[in-house]
Image: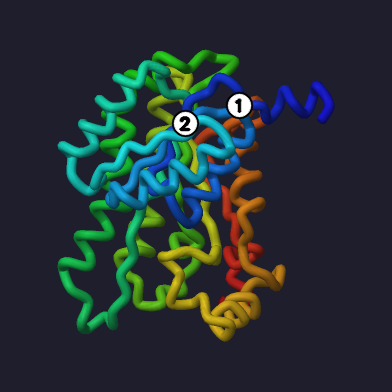
Amino acid sequence: MSDYLESLFNLGGKTALVTGGGKGIGRMIAEALLQAGARVYISSRSADDCQAAASEMAELGDCRAFPHDLSRIENIEALAADIESAGHGLDILVNNSGATWGAPLEEFPESGWDKVMDLNVKSPFFIVQKLLPLLKASGTQEAPSRVINISSVAGIVAGSQSAYSYMASKAAISHLTRGLAADLAKDHITVNAIAPGFFASKMTRHLTSEEGIEFMRSVTPLGRIGEPKDVGGLALFLCGASGAFMTGSTIPLAGGMDLGAGY
């Protein structure tokens, strides 16, 4: 790699937190950050799964687990305290933890609405709030701290698939991204969002049969599903020097599904 490319994407010396970083898109991002030289902390609700994932990813670099149920404010506060105690500050925050719920409109339960909106919208907001002192301390005008929120193509297109609270939450996190970006620019913190289309993960396991994946290919203009390099590469762009002048954007990563063609 040339010195120029190294300067754009090298994350050596940076510390990142990826919520939900033990599986799915969160793990894809965590592994990309590790391979770019960052120290990566992951957090998820299951202590065993979180520790196991961190142990596996430690082969790629310095990875550590901080398991917490981030649907509760007191656990968000505990996570912030853990990261502060680790002593390496925080340069990058990826708000990836999320949930979905599907049910017919006539039967959609309040519990399904509240669970999804709380974890997908409220929790990222308070994670930013509680980690703000660390992010402020790390950011400079030339090398701002980074926040990446994981939205979804479901927050852009109108194909609900009966996941009403999910689509509303993902539209909300994209708009929250813009508000946070406007407020935090003065503190040398950029805030952007990624809106993935279909990636194989636990959340999309109901569509990961051969027939399900073929259907998702058929409704994606580029004719395939997302791969780790797709979301990993975009995360590296946003976290490296390459992305230092971008803030307030929601970037579709959906193979054209956001264009509405056939979806």
Query: Decide: marks 1, 2 in contact (CB < 8 A)?
Result: yes
Q: Position of residue 193 (x, y in %)?
A: 49, 44
Disc number for residue 11? 1
Quadrant housing residue 132: top left
* Amino acid type, residue under disc 2 in the picture: Ala
Q: Is residue 91 above or below residue 179?
A: above
- Classify 82 as above or below 227: above
Image quarter where the C terminus lies is: bottom right
Q: Quadrant of residue 43?
A: top left
Residue at image point 24% right, 47% down: 69
Residue at 28% in and 79% down: 103
Q: Is residue 190 visible?
A: no
Q: Locate residue 57 relative to residue 74 in the image: left or right.
A: right
| Residue in the image at 60% along x and 55% along y | 253
What residue is shown with label 2?
16
Q: Position of residue 148 (x, y in %)?
A: 47, 39
Q: Is residue 98 left or right of residue 32?
A: left
Q: Secondary structure at mark 2?
A: strand
Count of numbered circles on the image:
2
Which of the two residues, 168 or 111, is positioned nearer the viewer here? 111
Task: Give the alpha-carbon distance from disc 1 to disc 2, as whole Å.
Answer: 10 Å
Describe residue 214's horizontal placement relative to residue 157 as left or right: right
